[in-house]
Image (cartoon, rainbow, N blue to C red):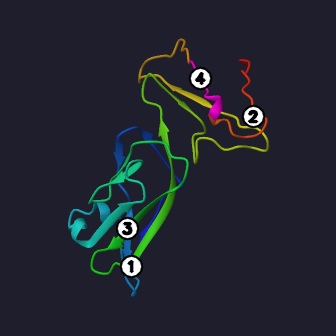
Amino acid sequence: STSLKGGRTVRRMVDTSQPTSVAIIFDNGLTLPNIARSDWVDVEAVISFSSSDMDTIGVDTIGSITLYNNAHSLITLSAQLTCNSSISNSLSVAANLDPAPFDVDFGRVNEWQFQPSGSSLDVGVRIQAPDGEQLINFQVLCEFDLDFLTSEGATFAEAAWS
């Protein structure tokens, strides 16, 4: 069998990559841990990797994943043995971008960016200052297209700074 390990959220800045961790576990219990980063196994010849949405989370032939966009639904990352496609494993994850330096990201840090709670939707704002610099002030202008507010009675309210 193959085993994929990871959290439920892929969080990175846009267009940045990270390696995956894939183990091969044989019927007799022998385990080849972290096969995707092995320097003695031709990973491409042993395992094939895929993503259900390559425009959001891309995956290359050695299993490194690259985050391109946020997503409103889970993305399935899969690994399968090339010699036997019936032996595979998948992991469903949320894609959630981190802000780059001098950038802003709306929504929650983990899982989906926007998760309603009862009849309200709190939208967090994260602002990233470059390493070694302090953020003195920042102006964010948000525009909402009322045509996309589909919930009955949906409104926009400015929050007071605390």
Q: Cα distance, mark 2 to mark 3?
A: 42 Å
The picture places residue 136, in percent across and down from the top left corner, at: 53, 12
Mark 2 vs mark 4, CA separation in Å: 15 Å
Three-letter residue code for mark 3: Ala
Q: Earlier in the sequence, mark 1 or mark 2?
A: 1
**Amino acid tagged 4:** Glu
Mark 1 = which residue? 87
| Magenta stretch prevailing secondary structure | loop
Closer to us: 55 or 154:
154
Q: Which residue is drawn at 75% across and 29% down?
A: 155
Q: Residues within 10 Å of mark 3 (few under 14, many from 20)?
A: many
Q: Which mark is residue 79?
A: 3
Tell me, yes or no, if residue 41 can be seen here.
no
Q: How far apart are marks 1 and 3 (CA)?
A: 9 Å
**Residue 50 in the image, given as x and y percentages of width and height:** 36, 62
Classify the position of the N terminus by image quarter. bottom left
Label 1 vs label 2, nearer the camera:
2
